[in-house]
Amino acid sequence: MTASGDDQPTRRRWRLVPIPVLTGVLAVIAAVVLAVFLSGCRGPSGGQGPAASSRSAAPSTGPTYRATARVPVGKTPAGVAVNPGTQTVYVTNYVDGAVSVIDGSTRTVTVTVPVGTDPSGVAVDPGTHTVYVTNESDGTVSVIDGSTRTVTATVPVKSPNGVAVDPGTHTAYVTNYVDGAVSVIDGSTRTVTATVPVGNSPNGVAVDPGTHTVYVTNYGDNTVSVIDGSTRTVTATVPVGKDPRGVAVDPGTHTVYVTNRVDGAVSVIDGSTRAVTATVPVGKDPYGVAVDPGTHTVYVTSGDDTVSVIDGSTRTVTATVPVGKHPGGVAVDPGSHTVYVTDWGDGTVSVIEHR
């Protein structure tokens, strides 16, 4: 609509207003603005009111989360895993072909371990302090002794990507994204003892240590394959959202969390019924996911350079934490409840704590 002369006040029309009337009007406007400003700045108890956000508004009585440190590592850090017994953090540096070892207490890199070409996934067996690293372009898995911090074995595995460990059986599970399968590695012999066919383009993998059940995301057909660790067979296939990538298990509740990149959401799977019971909206392009088993809190990395914090009991996002550029992997130290996030674009690891 085109504005007419009556819609646009001229300098002359403003001058026609008597000065006393104008003064009174300005006083009223100032009082209204001041009242609105003060009500917006004060919360229920007179403190700062919460900022409006569809994902980040945390309850006033709940914990607050923030990134308290950024640890420089190698180029394009991808995967991350924590050994809770030693508070040691392992980070794969994709371009460097190496693993950065971080002391969780000092938050400094203490050593860098050369591995294969394009290392991506990483997992720790806390009982033996053994670290497994998938090297995508080599078609191998590097096995690192956590005490000596040296590679003690190299296991041939075709197109390896994600990796997870069952601490009870000392078995490592590796997704083969080209073959549509999962390689099963015996931790004692460090050899592949079985190959389990799954869905199309498997990516993430996680283990429920209580039931020895393995969950695998298949981003090529939007499903999760459920593997019985004892029989090494697929017992169920669960449809989830579009482009599922990361997967994590809460061992206390046997709940499974899956990130769906295209949907911008997390599918929540009941491990007993093997059905999706909820879908939680998170940030843009969610990828990594990890669970704090002590608090039943879920952490999800997103392409908008944030981490969404999900309350596992209410299945809602209670906080959104800014981190570095292009966050990917995420892991939790269950002892200290500290969260570690790889910032692919920055060459750093963000450390998140809550109070």
Image (cartoon, rainbow, N blue to C red):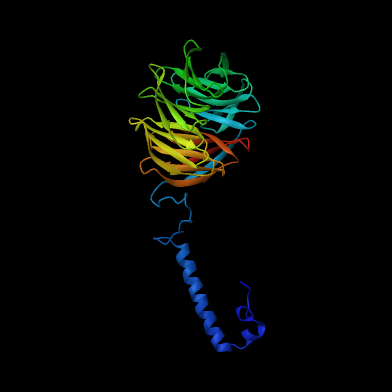
Q: Residue at point 55% right, 33% down?
A: 107
**Quarter of the image where the C terminus is located:** top left
Locate residue 166: give its quadrant.
top left
For residue 89, side relative to residue 293 (left or right): right
Rendering coords of residue 64 (x, y %) = 45, 47
Query: In this view of the protein, can residue 351 be seen by the observer?
Result: yes
Locate residue 323: give its quadrant.
top right
Query: In this view of the protein, can residue 336 be seen by the observer?
Result: no
* Residue sitting nearer the eye, 145 or 78: 78
Rendering coords of residue 68 (x, y %) = 53, 42
* Residue sitting nearer the eye, 53 or 279: 279
As displayed, is residue 44 above or below residue 235?
below
Q: Residue at point 59% right, 87% down?
A: 17
Locate residue 152: give its quadrant.
top right
**Quarter of the image where the N terminus is located:** bottom right
Rendering coords of residue 40 (x, y %) = 47, 64
